[in-house]
Image (cartoon, rainbow, N blue to C red):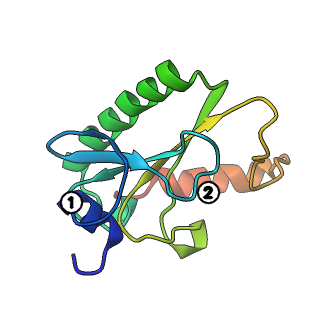
Amino acid sequence: MDRCEFCAIVAGSGPAEVIDADEQTMAFMDTSPATVGHALVVPRRHVADLWDMGAELAVPVMVAVHRVSLKIRDTLRPDGLNVLQSTGAAAFQTVFHLHVHLIPRYAGDPLRLPWTPTPGDPATIAEVAARIRGSAA
């Protein structure tokens, strides 16, 4: 895809510190890391987001996420790891090529949840669950 910075990285024409690759995926360091070791896993084929990805690509992407997470764990020894995928601008997606963030977490790092967990209304939760269960997807 023209002008996609992640497609350029996959093609070898964009700058990146690649840390893992296979036939269908590539992983590289985030250039604006949230913490030390923050990496991205992308499919080699351009897909805009999670909703654009077919089921045939879901398995290799998640296998790569798992493989890279183990590499991060074994080399950096973080205290935890966040796996984050944003679909759409409303969800903070800024590069419209599917990517999964692997963010190592360290005790005392400055990252916080983007929401404050509070109990939801059980009736609303049940109603929304019923609607989702009834979806054809």
Nearer the observer, 54 or 75: 75
The quadrant of the rendering that contains the N terminus is: bottom left
Label pair 1/2, CB-CB below 8 angstroms: no
**Left or right, residue 28 beside residue 3:** right
User: As shown in the figure, which amino acid type bears the numbered disc 1?
Assistant: Gly
User: As shown in the figure, which amino acid type bears the numbered disc 2?
Assistant: Val
Q: Which badge, 1 or 2, is on the more N-terminal residue? A: 1
Location of mark 2 (residue): 128
The number of numbered badges drawn on the structure is: 2
Location of mark 1 (residue): 12
Whether residue 7 is situated above or below residue 74 in the rendered picture? below
Residue drawn 79% across the image and 46% down it: 110
Identify the image quadrant of residue 136.
Answer: bottom left
Closest to the camera, between mark 1 and mark 2, is: 1
Image location of residue 25, percent across then percent down: 25, 46
Which residue, as the protein is rendered here, is positioned at the far left? 23
Residue drawn 48% across the image and 19% down it: 74
Q: Secondary structure at mark 2?
A: helix
The quadrant of the rendering that contains the C terminus is: bottom left
Image location of residue 31, percent across then percent down: 50, 57
Image location of residue 28, percent across then percent down: 38, 48
